[in-house]
Image (cartoon, rainbow, N blue to C red):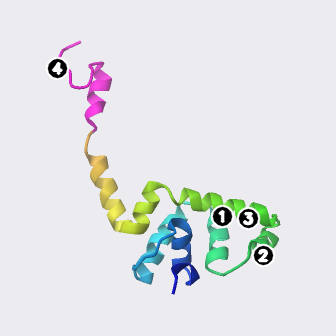
Amino acid sequence: MAIHKRQYPYNLYYAILSEDTDADENTLRENVGFLLLRLTERERRILLMRYSEGFSYAGIGARYNLTRSRIQEICRGSLNRMRSPADVFILREGVAAYITFQSHHRSRPSPLRGAQRSGNPVGSNQSP
C-alpha cells in the first residue's frame, strides 16, 4: 500500500517528505510528534485534524471560522517549515539522533569565534 494512502503518522510523513519509510509506527509517531511541538498550537491542531482525524479543509475552516483556502495556506506553510533540514533530519534519523547531534555540535567551539573577537584574520598568528 502506498504511504500516502495510510493513516497517521505515515500520511503526514509522506506530506512532508514525499517518500516512503520503513520506520515502525511508534518511532514515526514520536518523530512526527516532536516536529508538531515546534509549531504553534493552532498549526498543530489544524494539521492533526487534517492528517489524524481526516477532516477536509472546509470542515476545519468551519471549526475555526476561516475559509477553506486559509486553512490550506496554514497547512502548506506548516508543512514547508517541517521540511527544514533539521526537521527532515529528525524525521529520517529520529529525535535521539537529533539531540545527540545538537549536543555534540554545541559543545565544540567555533574556530572563528576567537579570531573575530581579537580582530585577527582567521588563521593569522600575528598580534594586533
**77 or 115, which is in the foreground?**
77
Question: Which sits earlier in the primary sequence, circle 2 or circle 1?
Answer: 2
Using a 10 Å C-alpha cutoff, classify the residue at mark 4 as few (fewer than 14 neighbours), some (14 to 19) or many (20 or more).
few
Report the residue marked by disc 3. 71
Give me the residue at 71% from left, 64% from top: 72
Give me the residue at 78% from left, 75% from top: 59
Report the residue marked by disc 2. 59
Question: Judging from the image, what secondary structure is the residue with disc 4 in?
Answer: loop
- Circles 3, 1 touching at the beta carbon (< 8 Å): yes
Question: Judging from the image, what secondary structure is the residue with disc 1 in?
Answer: helix
Residue 13, image x, y percentages: 51, 72
Q: Amino acid at mark 1?
A: Cys
Report the residue marked by disc 1. 75
- Circles 3, 4 touching at the beta carbon (< 8 Å): no
Residues rendered magenta in the picture: 110-128
What separation in Å lies between label 1 and label 4 (alpha carbons)? 52 Å
What separation in Å lies between label 2 and label 1 (alpha carbons)? 14 Å
Relative to 107, 46 lies left or right = right
Q: Amino acid at mark 4?
A: Asn
Question: Which sits earlier in the primary sequence, circle 2 or circle 4?
Answer: 2
User: Which numbered marker is on residue 125?
Assistant: 4
Q: Amino acid at mark 2?
A: Gly
Q: Amino acid at mark 3?
A: Ile
Question: Which sits earlier in the primary sequence, circle 1 or circle 4?
Answer: 1
